Image: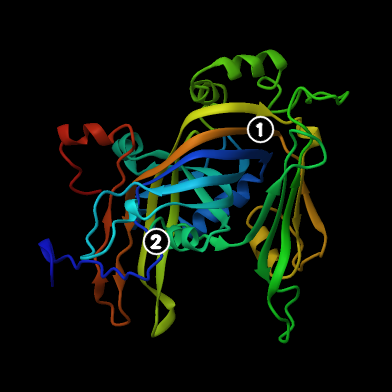
Amino acid sequence: MNGAHGQIPYTQSAASLDVPPPYHFPGVNVNTFIWEMDVSLIKHYCDTYLNIGTPEERGYTYRPAVFWPYATLLVLQYPVMISAAVGTDMPHEVPYCDRGVISQTEVFIALPVVRYGRGPLGLLTESALEWALPFIVVGNPMSCVCGREMLGLGKLLAGIECGQSTYPRSFRTHMTLPGWANDKPDTMQENLTILDITTGPTLPTFRKHSPSVESLATALSSRDMGWLMGQMQSVSNMIDQASMEMIPTEMRTIGLKQYRDAADPNRAVYQALTSCRSHYSNIRNFEFYDEKDVTIEFNDEGSFHELLNLFFRLPKEPTGEKIRVDAQAAFKFEADIDFDQMRIIRNVPIQDRFGHYVTEGSEDLASPWFRPWRGFFAGRKGR
């Protein structure tokens, strides 16, 4: 083996699309929509994709953030995407940070989940709030590859159209995704509509109605509050406090990164829970939509049915109808976004078909608050 401690260096190809982090994305336009979600569906997602193995084996348990039973749908338009990595390990190759920029549009649904450590000490030092992204699509193939290879996010390549809706200061998104209209053997895959979003103009509007008193946005969407937010140099602190830090200005994602065994596709040769920090800074031009003027429709058609089952309780078979979501809050802003602090939360030990370990397990469960301090304390030697 090559490298220190038996580590094998990655063989980089000049034709590869996987650009290593960190990344810097200035001037991103973000439209955000929040709706209430069935917590039991979030729990099912955690048990299926995050709680792999027994509690004793993994040392933690992921559960829904029951104090925030909402799904957050974000539509992001990146005018410029920059690799912030310094230098390169590729001989005679131009560093990625010197290769120029790309742009893209991205849509994802984020679910807050809580990782609970085991035992009193683990509960204190290994628990963390993280964001699972069960659905994430992008319009750029390089971003799609990087998201899967580097960040462990299950990105899909989609057709995403964004623009202004009927009125000035309004917004619309139309999204298509490769899928099958039905499950017949001779059905050809094609690009089908999976999501449509339209809004009215941002507040204040000419509409006679105002946000519901039961709305999540009521306390935040008055004209005076909007003016105050617009005057602040850093609105992110106010957003964090007003939303109990659940409107994400700093997201620590959690995702299952895995590769199949080519000889046995039902087995994995690599499996790990990976985390990455996306930090929103320089937030500006923050405006609310009236949630009554927001229409969010998912298309329950063909192969999309299985995907939508992650977020909605649906009949056994696709209905062919649109699933309309009632937004509890909707807003837009601009921000600079940085992706950094890549970590492997847990590297799952892998056995071959004879029961021999081919990949040793490892973990890095320290809570964000505890990480700077753990060097002052003796590590846990066992569970």
31 relative position to 381: left or right? right
Residue 189 position by quadrant: bottom right
Read off the residue under disc 1. Answer: 331
Note whether 149 is above or below 202 in the view shown.
below
Query: In this figure, what is the number of numbered marks?
Result: 2
- Name the residue at the left extreme: 4
Using the rendered image of the protein, determine whether residue 260 is visible from the camera's viewpoint: yes
Query: Residue at the location (69% across, 70% down)?
Result: 303
Using the rendered image of the protein, determine whether residue 309 is visible from the camera's viewpoint: no
Residue 50 on image: x %, y %: 45, 55
Residue 72 position by quadrant: top right
Disc 2 secondary structure class: loop
Nearer to us in this view, 155 or 142: 142
Q: Residues within 10 Å of mark 1 (few under 14, many from 20)?
A: many
| Distance (Cα) linking label 2 and label 1 | 39 Å
Name which residue type carries label 1. Phe
Residue 317 on image: x %, y %: 76, 68
Query: Residue at the location (34% across, 36% down)?
Result: 368
Query: Residue at the location (15% across, 38% down)?
Result: 378
Location of the N terminus by quadrant is bottom left
Read off the residue under disc 2. Answer: 53
Please report whichever mark, 2 or 1, sits nearer to the chain's N-terminal start.
2
Name which residue type carries label 2. Gly
Residue 231: give its label.
none
Query: Residue at the location (28% across, 33% down)?
Result: 370
Q: Residues within 10 Å of mark 2 (few under 14, many from 20)?
A: few
290 relative position to 17: left or right? right
Nearer to us in this view, 248 or 40: 248
State which mark lies toward you, 2 or 1: 1
Disc 1 secondary structure class: strand
Residue 380 on image: x %, y %: 20, 43
